[in-house]
Amino acid sequence: MTEAEWLTSTNPYPMLDFVRSWASDRKLRLFACGCCRWIWPLLPSELERKAVTLSEQFADGLTDCETLGIASSAVEESHNAGYEKSDMTWCC
């Protein structure tokens, strides 16, 4: 992927494939948070936004896995019954 492709990309998958082989866990977490920030207005509630913020803090060592897990559980509980429960691991 060239710099021009990176700067104009609207699809995060090729970007993730590009960085996955050399990026640290911190960088990958922050990339995921950046993707969430990209769609920030579409996040259903303040609860999801807080979880993204906590994820950023976790990546920088400013909060712990337990706090992040609590936020993740709160987000999952807030979703409608029609939503599939996520297998996504928020941390650790």
Image: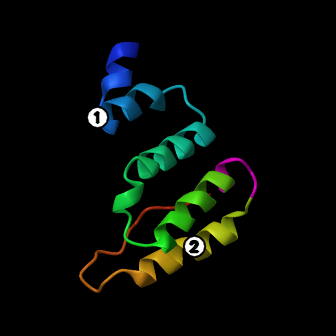
Residue 71 visible in this rendered orientation of the protein: yes
Residue 23: percent from left, percent from top: 55, 30
When the figure is inspected, residue 34 is found, relative to residue 15, above or below; the finding is below
Residue found farthest to the front: 41
Residue 66: percent from left, percent from top: 68, 71
When the figure is inspected, residue 49 is found, relative to residue 38, above or below; the finding is below
Mark linked to residue 49 = none
The amino acid type found where label 1 is placed reads: Thr
Magenta stretch: includes residue 61: yes
Q: What residue is pinned by disc 2?
A: 71
Q: Viewed as shown, does residue 88 lie left or right of 5?
A: right
Residue found farthest to the left: 82
- Label 2: how many residues lie within 10 Å, few (<14), some (14-19) or many (20+)? many
Q: Residue at x 50, y 41 (%)?
A: 31
- Label 1: how many residues lie within 10 Å, few (<14), some (14-19) or many (20+)? few
Give the magenta-colored segment's residue range.
58-62
| Mark 1 touches mark 2? (CB < 8 Å) | no
Q: What residue is pinned by disc 1?
A: 10
Numbered disc 2: secondary structure? helix
Q: Main secondary structure of the magenta part?
A: loop
When the figure is inspected, residue 23 is found, relative to residue 42, above or below; the finding is above
The amino acid type found where label 2 is placed reads: Ala
Q: Residue at x 28, y 86 (%)?
A: 81
Residue 64: percent from left, percent from top: 72, 63
Q: Viewed as shown, does residue 48 lie left or right of 83?
A: right
Residue 67: percent from left, percent from top: 67, 71
Chain-order first, disc 1 or disc 2: 1
